[in-house]
Image (tube, helix red, strand yellow):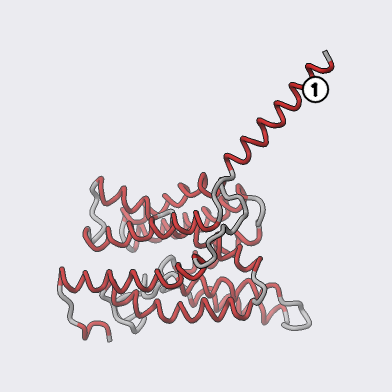
Amino acid sequence: MSISLNSLSIISSTIGRTRVSMEKRLNSNHLKLIAIIAMTVDHFTDLFYPGFPIAVLPIAMHLIGRLTAPIMWFFIAEGYHYTKNIRKYMFRLGLFAVISHFAYCFAFGISIIPFKTGIFNQTSVMYPLFIAVVVMWIDDLKAEKLNNKLKTAIIFVLIWSAFPANWSCIAVLAIFQINKYRGNLPKQTISMMEWVMVYAIVSFFFVNKAYGIVCLGVILVYPFLRMYNGERGKTKWLKWFFYIYYPAHLLILGILRVHLYGQDFKLLF
């Protein structure tokens, strides 16, 4: 009987390990590729179905697109944790935020001068990603390096500086919370969704009702993040692929938009 019980214990343990390995089968490269595909689907839906129409196909495609932001937020927090040189990490994000601003404005036909055509979505999500890393870095500075009151004031200003960007201040706050609860995915998801709900409510009343509701589709990312195994993956060049792909696909989007709908380039200035 003891042999039988030991055998059952070994089998049960093996099944448990197999189940965990099956659940944790996505590395960071897999998830980033999912984010890239979802983002491309979402942005090209904006091109071919402008104005966020309430119809099954465009809404479904926009829901797919909701996977992108939370995956980006999650890996910005992971990148902050793992980076060996925080200053280089911030510089890289800041540089691509500047490049992406011009590509974003060209893609969606808005002025490169913030607030000229509105107060929402005036620059790309790369800016809040950059600001989030700066905020986390400042928050981690010791008191002798930066007075707590001054630290709070700087963080407050930085967070609000992301207001006109895609996903607004919410992206910064979501990343901050994801970093705070690192290692606890349920808490990360709940705290992230609290801020997403704020963004969804504001968008519902002041931007577009359908867009506000679709924003809640961010929750769909949870099962994907549950499958994250904590590994980078073997293809290291993918680290740079996203940085290059993001502004590049926006440029292609802008060229197609001009071809399909025309564009007065004076609007960009």
Against 18, residue 52 (above or below) is below
Compared across the picture, whether 228 is left or right of 54 comes to right
Q: Residue furthest front?
A: 234
Camera-side residue: 26 or 41?
Answer: 26
Residue at the top extreme of this rendering: 1
Question: Residue at (31%, 59%) from the top-left corner?
Answer: 208
Image coordinates for residue 229, horizontal then vertical, percent = 61, 50
Q: Quadrant of the C terminus?
A: bottom left
Classify 176 as above or below 197.
below
Residue at the location (56% across, 59% down)? 234
Where residue 107 appears, as percent x and y from the top left, is 29, 72
Amino acid carrying label 1: it is: Asn
Q: Give the residue at mark 1.
A: 6
> Horizontal and vertical percent for residue 160?
50, 75
Query: Position of 47 compared to 224: left or right?
Result: left
User: 5 or 183: nearer the eye?
Assistant: 5
Q: Secondary structure at mark 1?
A: helix
Residue displayed at 49% across by 65% down: 238
Determine whether, in the image, residue 9 is placed left or right of residue 77: right
Q: Please tell me how crowded label 1 is: few (under 14), some (14-19), or many (20+) other residues with Cα within 10 Å.
A: few
Number of on-image labels: 1
Position of residue 155 measured from the top left corner of the image (x, y, whole percent):
60, 76
Furthest residue in direction right, as rendered:
2
User: Quadrant of the image for the N terminus?
Assistant: top right
